[in-house]
Image (tube, rainbow, N blue to C red):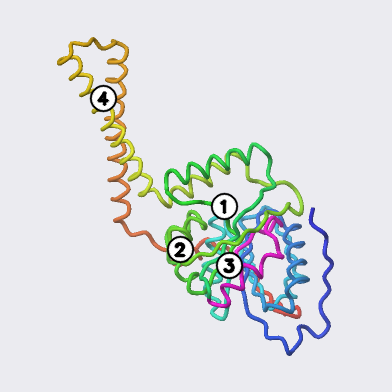
Amino acid sequence: MHEIVEIHEPVGGPRDDVVRRRIGIVLPVFDDWESLRQLLREVLAAYVEQYAIHLCIVDDGSTEVVLPSDLLSLFDSADVIHLGTNLGHQRAICVGLVRISHVHDLEAVVVMDSDGEDSVSAVPDLVTPVLSGRSDVVVAQRTSRSEGLRFRVFYKFYKMLFRLLTGERLDFGNFSAISPRALQHLVHSPDLWNHYPCAVMKSRLPLVKMPVPRQERYFGCSKMDVTSLTTHGLSGLSVFVDRIFSRLLMLTGLVGLVLLSAVVAGVVVRVALQVPIAGWLALGTTAAFIALIQLVGTLAVLAFVSLSMRSRFSPPPVEFAKLYIERSNKFVKRDKHV
């Protein structure tokens, strides 16, 4: 479990002789305000003198809002946006990234969960390569997970399926740091609306992976179950839907050629050598070949539908994400509430 950290406002604020780099942190939250409070306490205790921090907290349509106003006013600035409805974790992150992209003096932006599973101590490891210009995106590569056995088994299966269908290795989540240039690239990508990690992969931005163990939650249990994981997984696959259809079409075409070769070989053997072919084998091969032809036809239609959808204009999140914001609260340091 996490150690509870006490935080007190430093007398006189940060030292004047320390140059603090200005970073932003996007934190989605849904009915988990107690965990958010503890996370803010740890961030303040660790980095109040190291970074000038701008928070962007995304309330994803919580049923009850309990703002930690006393802690928010200790950061250099904070922006709490309340969504009009629950959009889900990935789209809440998308709205938060669009919102924070309008803050023009940030040198890096961190995306992390507010439940404590993303380690606060790993923030400098992610941020430093971005601040130094060595990378546009640094992601936390998961080395361990804290969920139950059934969840881990399904997640392992999903990652194998994802690799098979897309050719990409999905071994990181939302916990990451991105440069302002990468941020502008992502908020103009329609893929960001469905799945943040997959949008990062598809963007082809320079990417660095840092091994970071997943921590335990501060309070309560994870809301991610098998159903949520399935929805989350399909959202990730949808980013690569054109690639998936192409791979499946090529795979079924290859299997079709193998079956066709087997049928031709069987006919040649039967006619030339007068060798009888077992009835069950001929029937099974014929049925498999017919089914394969139907599958190829279906995949071909779906592939053309996918190509047709790509030809249509998809508005980037930077144009419409603000429509989901119902209201916002702004905080600045020393309890100056705007």
Q: Alpha carbon of mark 4 to alpha carbon of mark 1: how far?
A: 49 Å
Q: Badge 2 is on which residue? A: 317
Mark 3 crowd level (few <14, some 14–19, many ≥20, 10 Å Cα): many
Camera-side residue: 321 or 106? 106
Specify the amino acid type for callout 4: Ala
Camera-side residue: 22 or 102? 22
Instruction: Choose mark 3 or mark 1, whichever is in front.
Output: 3
Q: Is residue 137 above or below residue 338?
A: above
Within the image, what quadrant is residue 311 found in? bottom left
Mark 4 crowd level (few <14, some 14–19, many ≥20, 10 Å Cα): few
Q: Alpha carbon of mark 3 to alpha carbon of mark 1: how far?
A: 21 Å
Going from N to C along the chain, the mark reached first, 3 or 1, is: 1
| Range of residues picked out in magenta | 110-133
Going from N to C along the chain, the mark reached first, 4 or 2, is: 4
Dot label at residue 88:
1
Q: Alpha carbon of mark 4 to alpha carbon of mark 2: how far?
A: 51 Å
Specify the amino acid type for callout 2: Pro
Q: Badge 4 is on which residue? A: 262
Q: Is residue 261 above or below residue 54?
A: above
Q: Residue at x 27, y 30 (%)?
A: 293
Going from N to C along the chain, the mark reached first, 4 or 3, is: 3
Q: Residue at x 69, y 55 (%)?
A: 117
Within the image, what quadrant is residue 11 found in? bottom right
SS type, badge 2: helix
Contact between marks 4 and 3 (CB within 8 A): the answer is: no
Residue 134: give x, y in percent of width and height.
53, 74
Residue 43: give x, y in percent of width and height.
73, 68
Q: Residue furthest left?
A: 272
SS type, badge 3: strand
Whether 316 is among the magenta residues is no
